[in-house]
Amino acid sequence: MALRVIRGSSTKDADFNGGSIEVDVNSVQILRSDIAMPVAGALLSFVTRDDTGAIASHEDFTLQGGPRSDVERLTWTCDLEPL
């Protein structure tokens, strides 16, 4: 199934060995009208095409944890883990 998504990245604090470290987090926003409920562990592939339509790049990710809804309930935000 093809979806339009908005990719993002940020950092968050994670507990590690009694301290805290900053880790990078990849995320994606998916329209709720496109998918009823994202499932943790689902595969998400990003394909970029060039002007001729040929595949220019390809990346695979899995959805991590449960999806979070925005205030207006229009999008799901899901964390991604690269494969």
Image (cartoon, rainbow, N blue to C red):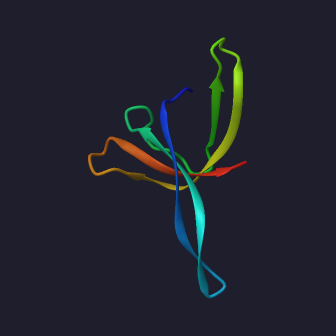
- Residue 27 sits above or below residue 48 on the image: below
Farthest top residue in view: 52
Q: Work out whether residue 12 or residue 70 is closer to the camera in this orientation and state it.
A: 12
Image location of residue 44, percent across then percent down: 62, 39
- Residue 38 sits above or below residue 45 on the image: below
- Residue 10 sits above or below residue 36 on the image: below
Q: Is residue 1 left or right of residue 53?
A: left
Farthest bottom residue in view: 18
Image location of residue 55, percent across then percent down: 70, 22
Quarter of the image that includes the N terminus: top right
Point 52% across, 67% down: residue: 12
Q: Work out whether residue 17 or residue 21 is closer to the camera in this orientation and state it.
A: 21
Q: Is residue 77 left or right of residue 39?
A: left
Q: Quadrant of residue 16?
A: bottom right
Q: Work out whether residue 27 or residue 69 is closer to the camera in this orientation and state it.
A: 27
- Residue 20 sits above or below residue 7 on the image: below
Query: How many callouts does the rendering have?
Result: 0
Image location of residue 83, percent across then percent down: 73, 48
Q: Is residue 62 left or right of residue 8?
A: right
Farthest front residue in view: 51
Q: Quadrant of residue 74?
A: top left
Point 66% across, 11% down: residue: 52
Farthest right residue in view: 83
